[in-house]
Image (spheres, helix red, strand yellow):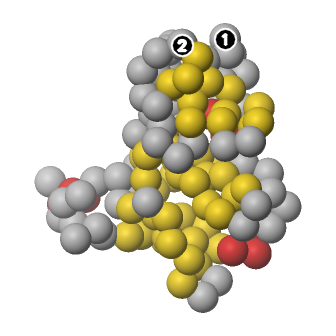
Amino acid sequence: MIRYVKAAELTECSSGRPKRVIVEDTEVALFFIKGQFYAVQNECPHQHFSSMHEGIVNGLEVTCPMHGWTFDLTTGQATVGGGRLKHYAVKVVGNDVLIEAPNPDPDWALK
Ligand code: FES
């Protein structure tokens, strides 16, 4: 069973601009495209810049602004370059945008 945690409020995301959020000490890039949310790790697997939220969005792909590696937002898989962004499930409950907890263990902060 997926554990979800609050990442943002729906009203914060209505502009459609990608958003950087920090959830359980993990940086996540949150995209709102044509009424759907997509969440991926913010750190590019190329040279580990936390820049995916500043990437160029084209359809359902995001291109890292640093060197152009490109990733499918539905899977996190690279379509240009290599590697994969961790991809998180997203759901909306009321005004809360919830994402799959980056740390599956609910006691992660206690360790
Ligand atoms: S750091 Fe993203 S493509 Fe190089």
13 relative to 77 in the view: left or right: right
Q: Which residue is mark 1?
A: 67
Disc 2: which residue:
81
Q: Is residue 58 visible?
A: yes
- Give the farthest residue toward the bottom: 94
Q: Where is 61 relative to 83, above or below?
A: below
CA gap between label 1 and label 2 equals 9 Å
User: From the viewer's perspective, is residue 57 above or below residue 69?
Assistant: below
Decide if ligand 1 comes within 8 Å of the CB at mark 1.
Answer: yes
**What's under tag 1, amino acid-wise?**
His
Q: The C terminus is located in which quarter? A: bottom left
Say what secondary structure mark 1 lies in.
Answer: loop
Image coords of residue 106 (percent x, y):
21, 66
**Residue 92 left/right relative to 23:** right
Mark closest to the chain's N terminus, 1 or 2: 1
Q: Residue at 38%, 70% (x, y): give it.
A: 4
